[in-house]
Amino acid sequence: MITIISTTNRKDSLTEKLSNYYASILKSKNIETKIIKLLDLPKDSLFSILYDNNDKNSEFNKIKKIIKDSEKIVFIIPEYNGSFPGVLKVFIDGLSWPSELKNKKCALIGISSGPQGCALGLSHFTDILHYVGANILSLKLKFSGIKNTDIKYIIENKNYIKALNDQIDKFLEF
Ligand SMILES: Cc1cc2nc3c(=O)[nH]c(=O)nc-3n(C[C@H](O)[C@H](O)[C@H](O)COP(=O)(O)O)c2cc1C
């Protein structure tokens, strides 16, 4: 099973729309796919899933189990203030130690309205994934200059569709 994580808790985000689209491509290839939206984390996650509360939040434990049961994980990451969203670090810190991500195979996609396609955020997040023992596909996609949160600006762009399909082909072999 491949799990896609929409790594923002912003409502109506482009990240969520791209996560749904990525899932539709995987499903069209008959691959069992799940989506975790960080928008659906328990609302009090900042206090209820960390430190002494680790493992005590039954709602978050279900999410941990999905990660544990996944063979591969795709992170779709918007650029927020030059890096990845803070809620993604809360999510990582809320996992167990050793992390449920240990030895998982991961693929990363960055998106931004500015020129970087979350390049720095992908690098920051790569360091963290390596620290927790995950393996990352070297082909990381960076979609930049997307000023509008309408998914058509991605799915009507032939270059983006080709890049997504190339990454998926490589990720399935990974
Ligand atoms: C809190 C916040 C910070 C952002 N910071 C940046 C940034 O540093 N650079 C950039 O190019 N875009 C930035 N953006 C725009 C998003 O990266 C862009 O809209 C992205 O394509 C999709 O974000 P979304 O999934 O929240 O819709 C920011 C957006 C938000 C909500």
Image: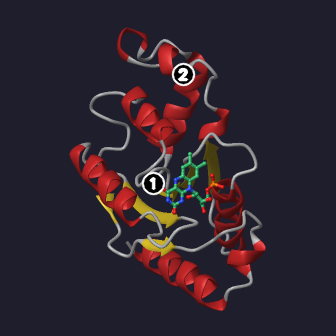
Q: Residue at x 37, y 60 (%)?
A: 122
Q: Quadrant of ligand 1?
A: bottom right
Task: Bin the neighbour count of mark 1 within 10 Å (Cα to Cα): few under 14, some 14-19, many 20 and up.
Answer: some
Q: From the viewer's perspective, is the residue at label 1 or at label 2 nearer?
A: 2
Quadrant, the C terminus: bottom left
Nearest the viewer among 52 and 72 is 52
Q: Which of marks 1 and 2 is nearer the N terminus?
A: 2
Q: In this view, does 46 lie above or below 18?
A: above
The reply, left or right, for residue 68 in relation to residue 165 is left
Q: Is residue 151 above or below residue 39?
A: below
Name the residue carrying label 2.
Answer: 45
Between the C-alphas of marks 1 and 2, the distance is: 25 Å
Name the residue carrying label 1.
Answer: 71
The numbered mark at residue 36 is none
State yes or no: discs 1 and 2 in contact (Cβ < 8 Å): no
The reply, left or right, for residue 131 in relation to residue 163 is left
In the structure shown, which secondary structural element does the residue marked by tag 1 occupy?
loop
Residue 3 coordinates in the image, percent (x, y): 55, 52
Is the C-beta of the residue carrying label 1 under 8 Å from the nearest atom of ligand 1?
no
Quadrant, the N terminus: bottom right
In the structure shown, which secondary structural element does the residue marked by tag 2 occupy?
helix
Residue 23 coordinates in the image, percent (x, y): 66, 63
Residue 108 coordinates in the image, percent (x, y): 44, 63
Residue 47 coordinates in the image, percent (x, y): 49, 14
Q: What residue type is labelled 2?
A: Ser
Nearest the viewer among 122 and 50 is 122
Q: Quadrant of residue 113?
A: bottom right
Q: What residue type is labelled 1?
A: Glu
Nearest the viewer among 19 and 149 is 149
